[in-house]
């Protein structure tokens, strides 16, 4: 259930198909004192080999609609690629460059996914969230605390139910060309034929991190300059195509991936004095 293809099982897996079902799951979990973990497309997570205690919820809220000429609403379970295809087919512009982003609207909003220097939060106009208490609220994007790789959802444990995106109008063929260019760029620069979770580390924060002169301020460049491309722990390897990707050769355990992440972090710290922070979300005990 994750793109890394590692990790153990959940105690309970709940495929949730409506807002009412989600409220019931949260209520039962609250009464039983059991943890609830949201899983979208599983493309940005590292699940421990021991698995996940409590309930893992996959939200199957798949509605897609156009709320006005300039706004599209997508349920949290809609895949980003599905949303891109849907908008392009209707001649709606804004999302076409996001073609090829794995995962769901829920995961993209939670981590404020980024591509080509833009954050998905920049396109969001409104969201609906469910608090752990079951209360549903609607918020504007300004209340989402969007920042690089960050949203309020990581802090509040609220669940995204849907998001609205601002769109313009475009010619489907032209939008399709932009989407194809994004897909081609990913194919050229990312190891897409092997399991991974995309970029493992966040890029350094110019406000906090001092990257030595002559090294581009990206996590991939730091891992690369530390000489770690191709470095392995068990079945996990730092990709030779993209140093910020760890790939699974089919035999990796979550412990292998985790050990390799810590090796890369320690090596970059020792060589360049930069503390890399995880972009990938770890779930379970490590
Ligand atoms: C090949 C590859 C390329 C990638 N390229 C990019 C890229 O260009 N840019 C980028 O930013 N990322 C990229 N990623 C990482 C990943 O695709 C994104 O982070 C994606 O947005 C994660 O979505 P998901 O649905 O898979 O979330 P998951 O991995 O399932 O979950 C991620 C987090 O979101 C939370 N979450 C999920 N749904 C909800 C919800 N409804 N409400 C609240 N919280 C929720 C989860 O609890 C978890 O904490 C890439 C990954 C791969 C494998």
Image: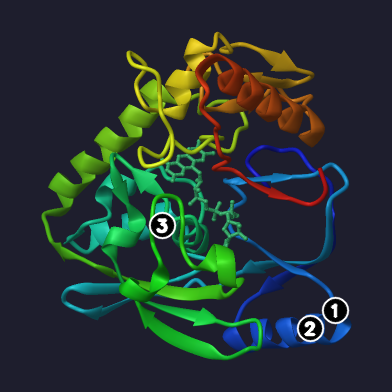
Q: How many numbered marks have been drawn onto this rendered protein structure?
A: 3
Question: The C terminus lies in which quarter of the figure?
Answer: top right
What residue lies at 84% left-to-right and 87% top-to-bottom?
A: 31
Residue in the foreground of this view, choosing between 249 and 91:
249
**How busy is the neighbourhood of tag 2: few (under 14 within 10 Å), some, or many (20 plus)?**
some
Cβ of disc 3 within 8 Å of ligand 1?
Answer: no
Q: Is residue 227 above or below residue 272?
A: above
Q: Is residue 151 left or right of residue 120?
A: right
Mark pair 3, 2: CA separation: 33 Å
What residue lies at 65% left-to-right and 23% top-to-bottom?
A: 266
Q: Position of residue 242 (x, y in %)?
A: 48, 21
Q: Is residue 29 left or right of residue 110?
A: right
Q: Is residue 278 left or right of residue 71?
A: right
Cβ of disc 2 within 8 Å of ligand 1?
Answer: no
Q: Position of residue 78 (x, y in %)?
A: 47, 64
Disc sitting over residue 82 in the figure:
3
Q: Position of residue 281 (x, y in %)?
A: 63, 48
């Amino acid at each position: 259930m994750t793109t890394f293809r590692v990790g153990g099982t959940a105690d309970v897996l709940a495929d949730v198909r409506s807002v009412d079902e989600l409220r019931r799951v949260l209520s039962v979990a609250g009464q039983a004192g059991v943890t609830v973990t949201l899983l979208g497309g599983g493309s940005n997570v590292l699940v421990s080999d021991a698995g996940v205690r409590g309930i893992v919820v996959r939200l199957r809220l798949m509605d897609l609609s156009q709320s006005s000429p300039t706004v599209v609403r997508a349920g949290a379970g809609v895949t980003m690629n599905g949303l891109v295809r849907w908008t392009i087919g209707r001649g709606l512009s804004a999302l076409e460059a996001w073609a090829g982003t794995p995962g769901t609207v829920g995961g993209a909003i939670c981590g404020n996914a980024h591509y080509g220097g833009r954050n998905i939060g920049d396109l969001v106009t409104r969201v609906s969230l469910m608090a752990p208490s079951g209360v549903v609220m609607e918020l504007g994007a300004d209340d989402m605390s969007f920042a690089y790789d960050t949203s309020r959802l990581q802090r509040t444990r609220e669940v995204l139910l849907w998001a609205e995106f601002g769109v313009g109008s475009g010619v489907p063929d032209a939008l399709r060309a932009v989407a194809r260019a994004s897909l081609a760029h990913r194919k050229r620069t990312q190891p897409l034929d092997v399991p991974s979770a995309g970029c493992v580390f966040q890029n350094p924060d110019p406000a906090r991190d001092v990257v030595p002169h002559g090294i581009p301020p990206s996590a991939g460049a730091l891992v690369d300059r530390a000489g770690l491309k191709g470095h392995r722990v068990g079945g996990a390897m730092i990709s030779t195509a993209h140093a910020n990707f760890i790939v699974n050769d089919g035999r990796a355990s979550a412990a292998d991936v985790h050990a390799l992440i810590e090796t890369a972090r320690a090596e970059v710290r020792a060589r360049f004095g930069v503390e890399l922070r995880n972009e990938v979300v770890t779930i379970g005990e490590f």
